[in-house]
C-alpha cells in the first residue's frame, strides 16, 4: 500500500511460530492468506484465536443480513478512521449488494436518502454506539419493533465487534 507506515507492533511472519500454525492454516484455508491484522495479533496466540472465533461468528453465523452487516462495518471504519478496515470490506459489501451510491455515501460520512428506513436505523445505531456509546430510547424502540431479540443482539454485537477491530487497527497503525 503506497504511503503505508509500519504497524506499531511488528507483524509475526506466517510459519514462524508453532503455536500459531493451526490458526494460520485455518486463515489460509478460509481467506487464502494471513492478513496483516492477524500477523500483528500473532503476538498473542490466545487473543488471535479468540478474535478469529468471535469475528467469524459475527460475520458468518448471525441472522443480520449481509448488506446491513457490511454497512455497519464500513460505517464504523469511517467513524473511527480505520481506512484499512474500510478498504478490506468494500468487496464484501459489493458482494452483499451494497451499490456504489451507498458505498460513496458511507465513505463521505453522509447518511441520507440513498438509504432506506431499515438501513438508516442500523446506521443510526452504529453512530450512537460508536460516537456516544448509549443508544437513545426512541432509536432502541424503533429497532426493537423491527428486530427480534436474537437479531437485535447480533446487530448490536456486530457494531461492538467492529468498533473493537477498528480501534485496534487505528491504535496500532495497522494498514495506515
Image: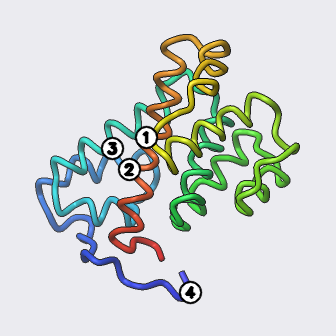
Q: Are marks 2 and 4 in contact (CB under 8 Å)?
A: no
N-terminal-most mark, 2 or 3: 3
Name the outermost residue toward the bottom: 3
User: Pointer 1 and pointer 3: residues touching (CB < 8 Å)?
Assistant: no
Question: Comparing marks 1 and 4, which lies closer to the viewer?
Answer: 1
Give 60 or 167, whichever is nearer the viewer.
167
The residue that label 1 is drawn on is 160
First in sequence: mark 1 or mark 4? Answer: 4
Q: Nearer the viewer, mark 2 or mark 3?
A: 2
Residue drawn at the location 40% of the way across and 53% of the way down:
165
- Which type of secondary structure does the marked residue at label 1 adopt? helix
Q: How far apart in space, not on screen, are marks 1 and 3 (Cα)?
A: 15 Å
How many residues crowd around disc 3 within 10 Å: few (fewer than 14), some, or many (20 or more)? some
Q: Which residue is mark 3?
A: 52
Dot label at residue 164: 2
Helix or strand or loop: what does disc 2 sit on? helix
Question: Which SS class for mark 3?
Answer: helix
Nearer the viewer's eye, disc 1 or disc 3?
Answer: 1
* Residue placed under numbered mark 4 in the picture: 2
How is the protein colored in the picture?
A: rainbow
Image quadrant where residue 118 sits:
top right
* Crowd around label 2: few <14 · some 14–19 · many ≥20 (10 Å): few
Q: Secondary structure at mark 4?
A: loop
Quick one: label 3 or label 4, which is nearer the N terminus? 4
- Determine the residue positioned at 45% across, 42% down: 133
- Badge 4 crowding class, 10 Å Cα cut-off, few under 14, some 14 to 19, many 20 or more, is few
Amino acid at each position: 500500500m503506497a504511503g503505508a507506515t509500519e504497524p506499531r507492533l511488528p507483524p509475526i511472519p506466517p510459519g514462524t511460530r508453532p503455536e500459531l500454525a493451526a490458526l494460520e492454516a485455518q486463515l489460509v484455508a478460509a481467506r487464502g492468506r494471513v492478513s496483516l491484522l492477524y500477523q500483528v495479533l500473532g503476538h498473542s496466540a490466545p487473543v488471535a484465536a479468540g478474535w478469529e472465533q468471535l469475528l467469524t461468528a459475527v460475520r458468518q453465523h448471525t441472522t443480520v443480513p449481509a448488506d446491513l452487516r457490511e454497512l455497519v462495518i464500513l460505517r464504523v471504519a469511517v467513524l473511527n478512521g480505520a481506512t484499512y478496515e474500510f478498504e478490506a470490506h468494500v468487496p464484501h459489501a459489493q458482494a452483499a449488494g451494497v451499490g456504489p451510491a451507498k458505498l460513496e455515501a458511507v465513505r463521505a460520512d453522509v447518511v441520507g436518502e440513498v438509504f432506506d428506513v431499515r438501513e438508516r436505523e442500523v446506521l443510526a445505531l452504529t453512530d450512537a454506539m460508536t460516537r456516544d456509546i448509549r443508544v437513545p430510547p426512541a432509536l432502541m424502540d424503533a429497532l426493537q419493533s423491527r428486530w427480534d431479540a436474537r437479531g437485535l443482539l447480533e446487530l448490536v454485537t456486530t457494531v461492538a465487534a467492529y468498533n473493537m477491530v477498528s480501534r485496534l487497527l487505528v491504535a496500532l497503525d495497522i494498514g495506515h
